[in-house]
Amino acid sequence: MATNRTFTMIKPDAVENNYIGGILKMINDAGFRIVALKYTKLSTEAAGKFYEVHKERPFYGELVTYMSNGPIVAAILEKDNAVADFRTLIGATDPTKADEGTIRKIYAKSIAANAVHGSDSDENAQIEGDFFFSKLERF
Ligand code: ATP
Ligand code: MG
């Protein structure tokens, strides 16, 4: 079933560079409503679990280390066509290939430290949101 929600994280590199405000402004300006929001830090174990789908990929170890290296901002976002529209807003995984005006083009340093996460399907948006937020934390 298609939903109108997606899940995002502002990743450690973007938090460290003080891009939280700029990224949240771009998200709001693009028409997404914030359903849930949390400033937190992933343990190595939690990052490993979150990215379990990438376990077999060569960059898995690097990704888990990087994502548990500093605080992140997690959020559930709402908008019509949320998953696809948010992927458009953030741009390609590799910021050198991201379109002008996308979050990754503006804020990402590299393919590994690429500023934001965006869910790739409605199913994963649900799973990822549930990973971070209880029912009481959604508005
Ligand atoms: P995300 O899931 O974070 O929104 P994505 O869907 O654009 O990103 P994925 O293929 O799901 O890209 O990869 C997950 C994350 O793994 C990327 O965002 C990036 O941080 C890291 N990653 C992807 N490819 C590479 C690579 N070739 N080298 C290093 N890190 C990578
Ligand atoms: Mg992905």
Image: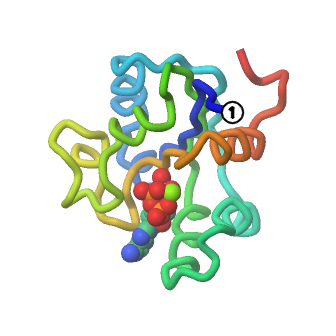
The N terminus, quarter of image: top right
Q: To which residue does mark 1 refer?
A: 1
Of residue 121 and residue 91, the one placed in the foreground of this image is 121
Residue 19, percent across and down?
36, 39
The relative height of residue 52 versus residue 50 in the rendered view (above or below) is: below
Of residue 115 and residue 118, the one placed in the foreground of this image is 118
Q: Residue at x 74, y 21 (%)?
A: 138
Q: Residue at x 50, y 20 (%)?
A: 79
41 relative position to 92: left or right? right
Neighbourhood count class around disc 1 (C-alpha, 10 Å): few under 14, some 14–19, many 20 upward = few
46 relative position to 115: left or right? right
Dot 1 falls on a residue whose secondary structure is loop
Quadrant of the rendered image containing residue 45: bottom right
The quarter of the rendering in which ligand 1 is drawn is bottom left
The relative height of residue 59 versus residue 137 in the rendered view (above or below) is: below
Q: Residue at x 61, y 82 (%)?
A: 56
Q: What kind of residue is marked 1? A: Met
The C terminus, quarter of image: top right
